Amino acid sequence: MLIPIYLSIPRYIMLNNTMFSVNQIRQEFPLLQKQFCFFGGKKGSVVYFDNAATTQKPKQVIDAMVAYYEEENANVHRSLYTLGEIATRKYEQSRKIIAKFLGAKEKEIVFTRGTTESINLVASTWGKRFLSSGQTILLSEIEHHSNLIPWQMLAKEKNLQLKFLPLGENGALDIQNIESFLQDNVGLIAITHASNVLGSISPVEKIISVAHQKKIPVLLDGAQSVPHIGVDVQKLDCDFLAFSGHKICGPTGIGVLYAKEKWLQEMPPYQGGGDMIASVWLDRAIYNEIPFKWEAGTPNIAGAIGLACSIDYVSSLGMENIHTHEKSLTQYAISRLKDIKGLKIFGTNQERVGLVSFCLEGIHPHDMAQFLDSRGIAVRAGHHCAQPLMRKLGIPATIRASFYFYNTIEEVDFFIQSLQEAKEFF
Ligand code: PMP
């Protein structure tokens, strides 16, 4: 007898030799328990497939932030009273947790507002100091606007060239000719570690190794990799890594820039103000030591505490377990999507994170997203902040379903069934 593929996919993940159930994990996410009234009148819980945009938050993370405000709220650093000391300890403990998660030193972790600000910080500080007229920044054709516009702005200001690693057939980066790209006085390579449109994981080990042979630093946009596959910056040896808290079950408004200590020691400050200084005169200042030099003003203390809690949360599940679960869901979703006539998937690379982008003949992605919403399914439809990639693919938009560890096979089944209903509806 033929066993349907989905029956062979585990609904439970092995964790430290104990089984844990996705359904149990879901209980820890208040939003996943909530009943909504969707457009068109359907009532029920949401099937949340927009995790590449932002993830849901477990109660632990929400509670950690509430606890800070209810019990520990004070400004950090330079406080000469107990409460201030507690808040400072919590804030710096968060940096320690994040550093350990990435395999970095504490002083290499700079708190920012998110991936976008982290990349802008590097462009505005490192880029201004270390890149000079005539040099090239090597990006790729699949970048999110966050890892494109800051470099366009810098290129204009400093008369730099931008070049782009091409998109390969299966949705991964084509790096066959990377050596030839590196002939062009490349001062920096800045690429996405995992595509938010195609799901493909970039061959960053190879890129970093080739780049470093030529002493070219590499920045990774880790917005879609850190939450889904984890990143060890020492193993990868990247020079910079940017990610956002809200995509890893943490709060919005907090993110991280990891930068190698050797670069942080040399980079000029980003914003000026309190906390980033050691001594100030009317006409000059001595800047604070790293990483505080890049954290001007009162930081997002609750955000850092929430992010550290979310990192503890995903670490307790295990990044490998998370990746395995997402991979199963994605493989299953792709296998079922392939059966839908007129449906085209963009990005078939095997090495991927848990998302799938597609178009369905005759139905505009925006109409499809609204139809799915009426069934209680949240997906994203649009250009996903990657307009150059959309142009390359020759389409205005895709529908993107993106998964996380709390999504289930049953949700994917319902999604597929709803897509089939949409075909009849339109
Ligand atoms: N890069 C990638 C690959 C992303 O997916 C995103 C978010 N969609 C970003 C950068 C920007 O992240 P944020 O808006 O949190 O700064």
Image (spheres, grey):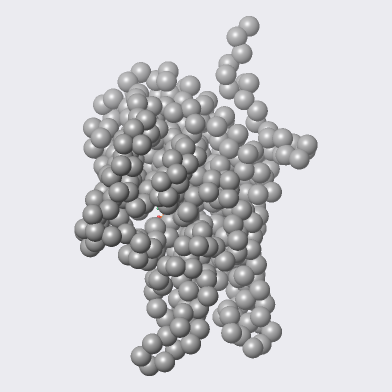
Q: Residue at x 24, y 51 (%)?
A: 161
- On the question of residue 111 being in view, the answer is no
Estimate the x, y position of residue 311 in percent, counting from the top left.
61, 54
Estimate the x, y position of residue 167 in percent, counting from the top left.
33, 33
Q: Is residue 40 left or right of residue 56?
A: left
Q: Is residue 330 left or right of residue 389?
A: right
Q: Residue at x 43, y 56 (%)?
A: 115
Q: Is residue 201 left or right of residue 79?
A: left
Estimate the x, y position of residue 341 in percent, counting from the top left.
35, 18
Q: Quadrant of residue 95?
A: bottom right
How many numbered markers are drawn? 0
Camera-nearest residue between 310 and 274 = 274
Q: Quadrant of residue 361?
A: top left
Estimate the x, y position of residue 46 in percent, counting from the top left.
50, 43
Q: Is residue 413 left or right of residue 26?
A: left
Q: Residue at x 78, y 37 (%)?
A: 17
Q: Compared to 51, does 306 lie above or below?
A: below
Q: Residue furthest right?
A: 17
Q: Compared to 166, does 149 lie above or below?
A: below
Which quadrant is the N terminus positioned in? top right
